[in-house]
Image: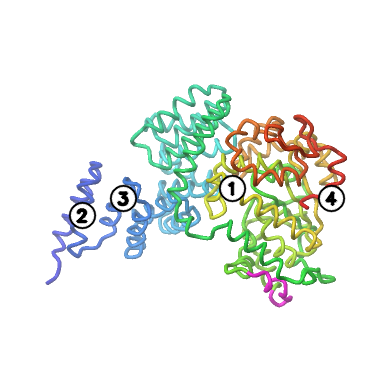
Amino acid sequence: MGRDLNADLQTLRKVLRFAEQRDFDRAADLAAATLSDGFEHPVLLNIMATRLELQGKFEESLALLERAVAIAPRDIGARNALSLCLQRLERPAEALRHSDELLKQHPELGFAHATRGNALIALGELARARQSLERALELEPGNLAALVALASIATHRGDHAAARRWAEQALAQAPGLPDAVLSLAAAELAAGDAGQAERMLQGLILDSRAGRLDRARASGLLGDVLDATGRYAEAFAAYTVCNDSLREFHRRYASETNMLDYSRALIASLGRVDPRCWKPRPGAPDGSTEARAHVFLTGFPRSGTTLLELVLDGHPEVATSEEHELLHDAVLRFLREPFDWQALALADESQLAPLRSAYWEAVRRAGIDVRDKVFIDKHPLHTLKLPLIAKLFPQAKILFARRDPRDVVLGCFRRRFLMNPAVYRFLDLAEAAEFYALTMEFAALVRPLLALDWHEVRYEDLVADLSGRSREICRFLELAWLPELERFAERARSSNHATPSTAQLARGLDRGRTRQWLNYAAALEPVMPVLMPWVHRLGYAADPAFGATSPGIPGNSSSPDPAAEKNQAPLA
């Protein structure tokens, strides 16, 4: 016996009426009963997904929305809801794909442009995001999602005055809206009113309407407020609350690639390869017929790579990557688990040439013009890919950023990055310290093997003498030094790509950002046994409070002892 179409349509109308009244429980109960009765419709699946999201069950919601799009690929509500759900799960690349698909079908939808803009912000693509959001406001003046997203872009760029204007417009429509509160609190902090910022964030944390991620982000920003007022123990506690919540929310990464085990496997496998296999072949190609020179800027997150990139981006003969992942195909070919370096070490040109071509094709797809330029591919964790880089691009130069290990690990713990298996390890202080130590150990092992043209840049020295150090870097890159290189703050304020450092660098050079770890010495004490060997090996002074000595920084100086530095092999 066939279904009664009129009865089904009446049920749909009733479900929608409950939803419009924001009675999601009754709407979802009726939707569930109707689905159980055999009537599958994207609206019903969407309504059930909405209730699951309100309960914080985003993975379950995602499954229902994926089913809704599968049965009705052209359903506007289901496709947009799927994109939003993927964003809440911090999977912006997938979210962007669905927004783009929806806009191909319906370019007139303002809310879809806003959804797309938010996905692009999460990917760090600020210029493209702004275009989408401005289009959303053209189509739907006052679109709330677009207003708060534009406030977020301004916050990322350190333009807190603009962020305040956008956030206040959003809050006038929706008091207490979490994204707007966060942008406004950041503006208050930047203006020097830490007390007001703290009150706003505490209110958001206690607001029952705020979601789990909203409260986590509020706790992280509260940590910055408390840090600014010198309440370091409270600040560390706030960062910990934020990270613990994020670890729980992103627990799926706990069962994916464990970057600590992966790094150990890289190190162990390296010792099983005949060192002669890494020697570069005479005349080995680089693969680009356009770039004048090829440089990889790497190190470890929070070691100063963003500052270096912004400085060098001021040179008209330089093109930078803005942290695009360009080695994707080569990584899939040679760096997948279970891991063994042998295949890469023995790879011949027939295997390497297609991957080299895929790399330069990725550069073109990213819209990076490298013609007659020194191309700088910046990615902090390319450190773990150095043998792959050496095989594919033996003529490339390496700029390696290093910084006091204690400041690096503290920075990774305090700052928010786009979530992935590596970043997940930063949410736990002990794991962040171990990941750092393993990465630096790997760099120390591969440097003498690979015979790459290598130049190290100490963050503390760059901050203390930007002019002198940037001149050294230009000589290494065979570039003429220009005074424009020092005006990096202007470029940060107009940057099209966001990292956790961008807003800080938009304020200019802050020499007080070295040795911040001293404010958190007690909190860092449990990980000092892991970090102190690198404090010694990299020439940074040990703090007397830990009963250790090191030939390096005397007192509070940020420069190493020249004699100690002369006799120290970097990363050795």
Q: CA distance from mark 2 to mark 4?
A: 68 Å
Q: CA distance from mark 1 to mark 2?
A: 50 Å
Given the image, on which type of amino acid does mark 2 rest?
A: Leu
Q: Could you tell me residue 443's position as x and y percent?
A: 72, 56
Given the image, on which type of amino acid does mark 3 rest?
A: Leu
Given the image, on which type of amino acid does mark 4 rest?
A: Phe
Residue carrying label 3 = 52
Q: Could you tell me residue 565's position as x and y percent?
A: 84, 43
Q: Residues within 10 Å of mark 1 (few under 14, many from 20)?
A: many
Q: Residue at x 68, y 52 (%)?
A: 378
Q: Could you tell me residue 29's position as x and y percent?
A: 20, 51
Residue carrying label 1 = 432
Q: Is residue 2 left or right of residue 108?
A: left
Q: Nearer the viewer, mark 4 or mark 1?
A: 1
Span of residues in magenta: 340-351
Q: Earlier in the sequence, mark 1 or mark 3?
A: 3
Q: Residues within 10 Å of mark 3 (few under 14, many from 20)?
A: some
Residue 344 part of the magenta segment: yes
User: Which picture quadrant has residue 99?
Assistant: bottom left
User: Which picture quadrant has residue 489?
Assistant: top right
Given the image, on which type of amino acid does mark 1 rest?
A: Ala
Q: Is residue 427 left or right of residue 52?
A: right
Q: Is residue 91 left or right of residue 307?
A: left
